[in-house]
Image (cartoon, rainbow, N blue to C red):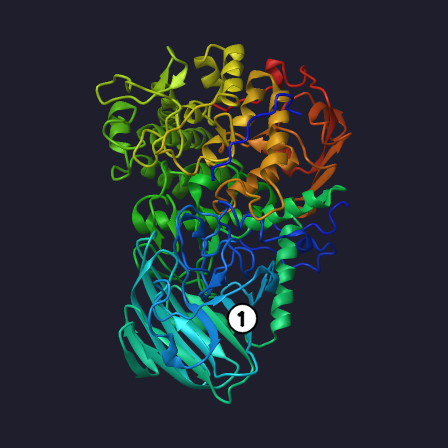
Amino acid sequence: MIVNNRLHKSWIPVLALCLGGFAVSCSAPVQTEKVATEYTAYVDPYIGSGGHGHVFVGANVPFGAVQVGPQNICKGWDWCSGYHYSDSIVIGFSHTHLSGTGCSDLGDVLLMPYTGEVRTLRGEQDNIEGAASSYYKHANESVAPGYYSLLMDNGVKVELTATERVALHRYTYPTDGARRLLINLKEGIGDQAYDTYLKKVDEYTVEGYRFSKGWSPRHKVFFTLKSDQPIESLDVFNDDAAAGQDELKGESVKGVISFKGNPQVAQVKVAISSVSCAGALANMEAELADWDFERVRQEADRKWNEQLACVDIDTQDERAKKIFYTAMYHMFIAPTLYCDANGDFRGHDDKVYTNNTWKNYSTFSLWDTYRTLHPLFTIIKPQYVPDMVNSMLSIYDQQGKLPIWPLVGGETNQMPGYSAIPVIADAYLKGFKGFDADRAYHAMVASSVYEKQNGVPYLLEKGYIPCDKIHEATSIAMEYAVGDWGIALAAKKMGKVDDYQNYLKRGKYYTQYFDKSINFIRPKMDDGSWRTPYDPIQSVHSVGDFSEGNGWHYTFFVPQHPEGLIELMGGDAPFVTKLDSLFVVEGDMGENASPDISGLIGMYAHGNEPSHHVTYLYPYAGQQWKTAEKVRYIQDEFYTDQPDGVIGNEDCGQMSAWHVMSALGFYQVNPSNGVYVFGSPLFDKASICLPEGKTFEIVAQNNGKENVYIQSVTLNGKPYDKSYILYEDIMKGGNLTFVMGNTPNKEFGAAPEARPKTAE
């Protein structure tokens, strides 16, 4: 159900351990002593597993390649991660998952322990041929960072934990019956296996692979499985008939392991690789040589604790802590590590690349995450930024353009824009080292003129994309303008004057779509006329003029240049009036409206990413206080501690990143300029760990549920009248103190010189 919450008329301990010791050019986090605060105690992985959150539930470590967890029978959109809180049937435990996406894929190497005979698995049940299944209850389920446990109704207790590339399973079988383990290489999560292989290598080892096509046009997962109990037999079969023992290749191979001695407890390690079974085995040997389940579980918890320690919050509101640290946990699930322990990985061109100078990542939900997650990473996870940029540049080399939505060896081409560009431009403009700036600039420019990219030839010819030629043309062009602005700023820093002027002009192409007669962004036809008739409330999913939105949403989609939009609307007062209207206007978006448009306040849709910067536009017109009240309302209403506590698709950390950054009290509106606009800090105090042992402390004096408005600000003890702060000031470390109150201070940030500005 789409949530439609209307705007209420009133709009009402210091960090225990800083993870210092690295510069922003480093490619890996530094090992430290144990973190004193148990941040993982505040994480509830069930948050977002109901409703439309689509989050991953299972065991993994931060940014790990392996995400091992339960898999339900896919029943539609809300099962994109393979699991939904409303379900009660499990068909196994697979090793790769997506978290929070609106499309489904992965679910590779599905294991299901059971008791009974091998042949009882044939036949159909809910269209899952040959798969064991069991009912389960949440009362018998437990999940925490790095750990998952379920006592299924079939009597088997499953416990899971993981390293970066290896999952460790522990099965406790019931006292009666023959104890089996099904390996299912047919089933995934919405994809289709086209080549699978399974072989018993020795008494303790099975290897195999699963090649599939789905949302990603191709991905290959090789694996090695080892048991701590000797394997008596591996019975392998396809859908139609048994094929004997030990080895089989085909489209839908499955196998059943029978253990010698019928042990009640068995442990299984599964390592994965995109390169080969040998690579998977090497990953296992590098990361998990023993069988100490509790040690691995504790190590996973330690890794999560260290990652979560980057921000320490001080509040008496335990529920708020739970929501905050769960949001941070969701932020660190993706992007995912996509390389073997020796650095090798399979590229989008199906070639194997050897690399040991940086770590390769994939699963970049860029159309979502360029807005908040990546700008937040530049503050709280700077050690990962160069590797992520290098991963995107490597994809450029493999496919001739920067990634759009890359998924473990394939390009989905999902969503409009070239959203890697603002991420890379932002990293360069903020001074990150560890990647080749000239190479990065070349990749950005080449991708912006890549003629196979949707709509780019029209953009180069006309300066806009005709709505009668390409679906979602208006959204595509406006997204391109965001990336073009980032290229312009990078060109300026590099002294490329002509490129700067060209891309600055392209960054202002949003003006091509602004119809001053109605004060709306409006689709434009090939002949230059406006789309007629035009209803800015109407939304048509996938084949309309806008991507997952309507004319109201995209009228305010100019994060790269809010000042220009204000000027188009006639100045501060008309702009604020129009923006106010967004939060109260009502209307029927139509029967074909995108299901992603959720979390509504009027026509503002917090459950989808194009709206995420919009509440932070008021300070550009001198009315910061309106941002404060709306941001705090969204925090209170749309982020909860329940399974439906994420108002829309989590989208690999973006929905949570908005909460985390906003809770700190600011937000980067332009994704490529390092200007963080003030909102309404949520906590009494937050301390951010920075490189070189520095700390940036954010204090909110007189804070509370009603005291949402900024009265005054000091930076490092000195009065500060601006309604924004710069990236470089945050990264120096220091103290930012807000004094809060229950009535607006309408003078704060009102002066033109105090407002955030877009660099040109």
Callout 1 amino acid? Leu
Secondary structure beneath label 1: strand
Query: In the figure, residue 558 lies in which quadrant?
Result: top left
Above or below, comparing residue 625 to residue 353 in the picture: above
Tell me the crowding category of disc 1: few under 14, some 14 to 19, or many 20 or more residues within 10 angstroms, Cα based: many
Residue 112 lies, in percent from the top left, at 46, 71
Q: Which residue is drawn at 30% across and 80% down?
A: 242
Which residue corresponds to mark 1? 168
Residue 519 lies, in percent from the top left, at 41, 14
Q: Residue at x 68, y 14 (%)?
A: 747
Residue 75 lies, in percent from the top left, at 40, 54
Front-lying residue, 492 or 720: 720
Query: In the figure, residue 721 lies in which quadrant?
Result: top right
Total numbered badges shown on the rendered structure: 1
Residue 613 lies, in percent from the top left, at 52, 30
Q: Which residue is drawn at 40% across and 56% down?
A: 74
Above or below, comparing residue 400 to residue 89 in the picture: above
Front-lying residue, 625 or 170: 170
Please indicate, yes or no, whether residue 547 appears anywhere in the rendered image.
yes
Above or below, comparing residue 490 to residue 244 in the picture: above
- Residue with the most extreme bottom position: 261
Front-lying residue, 426 or 232: 232
